[in-house]
């Protein structure tokens, strides 16, 4: 059954290698050609639903199994009354058995074959991208790039089969098109975007990472009747948390203390944003320890915040959020931050200090050995510094980068960005489906850190790795969901985001 993707569905996520293995297992259990026939039927049904008034359709089919899926769909649409034109790129070798059978069925259905898109397609019609699927590769001038360029210029909306062509199904990176075959800049620049994508058999991580969210448009999923629950996954999608239930007898001492340590000279705002988020996320008490000795000692707009010197904090009882706007000054306090609190969130400058200091890394590992909860919240550049690689390398495999950090530092890692990944040692990583580019402004990460500190404080002093990962994933989900639901005519600032948090 075809389902429209909405955030909150806890689907397993399978990369290219696992998807191919699952496909082979399913084919071995089904009659010949059955899996491709199911795919073609699912595509055709969704096409009819998306374009109920269409009279014509164009199906661009590649030489592999993705093209075979498109040929099966073309045969159904032709039989159901559409005037279908297929552009089928010639294979470099003999077609695989399933694709050859699909080609024969399309020919028998009376589908028209042509080298180019049919003239006269309208916005009521539909074009189908069945060129590459998960077989993405760099594009060079030639028939394939020409066909994709024609899809980008097409007046009809595009339904991509499995993955928009040119999108890496593992990491969400889109191929650039070179030479004379640049895509029409009025639609997608030099990259191809579809209005709808139907992913088949599995949900691929690249659809939700990097450029994938933009490239695939509205995402649909059909498991083709294959049960996936028994198979290991590369990741799982996060789900929203239930609202925190506080008993009537609760008081500020039972709702957790959060201490925010940061705010070097000129950067007090970062610490205040984190503290504001913790306050609105329901922490019982929020303390602010600014590293700027000349910083404020009260916030008239939020008198609930309690300002302390770093030495006056209750390091033992508080969940510590450390690093927001901390600059180089936070480095001197990191040994105590790593040794003392039961729960710790490390962000921003605390991570930068950790990246260049082996002794701090050893303290972090020792903290994990004592089963103290630690969550790191790096953006891609901070993650690259911690891993000793480039930002491009992190972005080329975000799942692997987050898992490497979590395993290497023995803590929970929230790798922020398009498709935030929450990883923990020994756990399947969680991939966040919410959020958008409006979060790409100064301070939104500080808000996330403070919010996470409040939720960890509410869990209590004993939190295992799996609980901490789930807690972080839920906060990330709601952080992104706020941005998704934000009114289009209102600016999304970090302060407004922090004040909109509800528990």
Image (tube, rainbow, N blue to C red):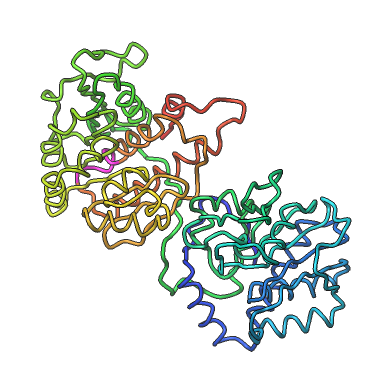
Q: Does 54 sit left or right of 295 as displayed?
A: right
Which stretch appears magenta? 456-461
The residue at the point 36 percent across, 51 percent down is 422
- In front of the other: 424 or 104: 104
Q: In which quarter of the image is residue 347?
A: top left
The picture places residue 478, in percent across and down from the top left corner, at 45, 41
Which residue lies at the image location 12% right of the left edge and 49% below the top edge? 362
Up the image or down, 212 lies above or below 204; here it is: above
Percent across and percent down for residue 328 are 20, 30
Residue at figure coordinates x 54%, y 25% from the top left: 491
Name the quarter where the N terminus is drawn. Answer: bottom right
The residue positioned 31% from the left and 43% from the top of the image is: 382
Q: Where is residue 372 in the image (x, y as percent from the top left)?
A: 17, 48
Observer-nearest of 355 and 19: 355
Q: Is residue 426 above or below residue 280?
A: below
In the drawing, does residue 89 fall left or right of residue 305?
right
How many numbered callouts? Answer: 0
Relative to residue 151, is residue 452 depicted above or below? above
Q: Which of 243 and 468 is in front in this view?
A: 468
Asked whether residue 459 is drawn in magenta, I would say: yes
Task: Answer whether residue 100 is magenta in the image.
Answer: no
From the top left corner, tell me how far across and down residue 242 is, in percent: 43, 45
Above or below residue 313? Residue 47 is: below
* Quadrant position of the C terminus in the picture: top left
- The picture quadrant where one finds residue 487 is top right
Please state if 78 lies on the left or on the right of 227 as rendered: right
User: Which SS does the magenta portion mostly show?
Assistant: helix
């Amino acid at each position: 059954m075809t389902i429209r993707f909405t955030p909150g569905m806890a689907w397993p996520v399978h990369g290219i290698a696992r998807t191919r293995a699952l496909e082979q297992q399913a084919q071995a259990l089904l009659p010949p050609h059955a899996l491709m026939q199911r795919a073609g039927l699912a595509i055709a049904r969704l096409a009819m639903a998306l374009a109920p008034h269409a009279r014509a359709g164009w199906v661009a089919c590649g030489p592999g199994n993705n093209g075979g899926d498109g040929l099966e769909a073309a045969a159904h649409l032709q039989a159901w009354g559409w005037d279908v034109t297929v552009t089928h790129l010639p294979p470099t070798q003999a077609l695989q058995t399933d694709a050859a059978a699909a080609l024969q069925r399309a020919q028998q259905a009376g589908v028209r074959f042509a080298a180019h898109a049919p003239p006269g397609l309208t916005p009521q019609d539909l074009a189908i991208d069945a060129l590459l699927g998960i077989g993405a590769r760099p594009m060079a001038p030639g028939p394939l790039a020409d066909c994709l360029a024609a899809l980008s210029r097409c007046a009809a909306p595009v339904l991509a089969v499995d993955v928009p062509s040119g999108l890496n199904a593992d990491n969400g990176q889109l191929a650039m098109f070179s030479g004379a075959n640049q895509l029409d800049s009025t639609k997608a620049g030099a990259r191809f975007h579809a209005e709808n994508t139907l992913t088949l058999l599995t949900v691929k991580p690249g659809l939700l990472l990097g450029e994938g969210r933009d490239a695939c448009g509205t995402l649909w999923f059909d498991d083709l009747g294959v049960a996936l629950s028994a198979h290991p996954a590369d990741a799982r999608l996060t789900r929203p948390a239930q609202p925190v239930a506080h008993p009537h007898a609760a008081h500020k001492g039972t709702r957790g203390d959060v201490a925010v340590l940061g705010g070097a000279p000129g950067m007090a705002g970062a610490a205040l944003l984190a503290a504001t988020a913790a306050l609105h996320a329901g922490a019982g008490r929020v303390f602010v320890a600014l590293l700027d000795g000349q910083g404020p000692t009260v916030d008239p707009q939020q008198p609930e915040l309690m300002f302390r010197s770093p030495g006056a904090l209750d390091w033992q009882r508080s969940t510590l959020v450390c690093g927001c706007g901390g600059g180089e000054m936070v480095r001197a306090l990191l040994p105590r931050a790593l040794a003392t609190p039961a729960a710790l969130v490390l962000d921003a400058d605390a991570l930068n200090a950790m990246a260049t200091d082996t002794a701090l890394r050893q303290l972090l590992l020792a903290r994990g050995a004592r089963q103290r909860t630690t969550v790191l919240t790096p953006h891609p550049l901070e993650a690259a510094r911690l891993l000793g690689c480039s930002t491009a390398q992190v972005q080329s495999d975000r799942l692997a980068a987050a898992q490497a950090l979590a395993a290497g530092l023995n803590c929970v890692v929230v790798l922020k960005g398009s498709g935030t990944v929450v990883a923990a040692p020994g756990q399947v990583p969680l991939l966040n489906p919410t959020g958008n580019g409006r979060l790409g402004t100064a301070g939104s990460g500080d808000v996330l850190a403070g919010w996470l500190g409040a939720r960890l404080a509410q869990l209590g002093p004993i939190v295992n790795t799996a609980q901490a990962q789930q807690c972080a994933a839920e906060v990330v989900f709601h952080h992104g969901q706020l941005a998704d639901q934000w009114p289009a005519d209102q600016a999304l600032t970090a302060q407004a985001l922090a004040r909109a948090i509800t528990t």
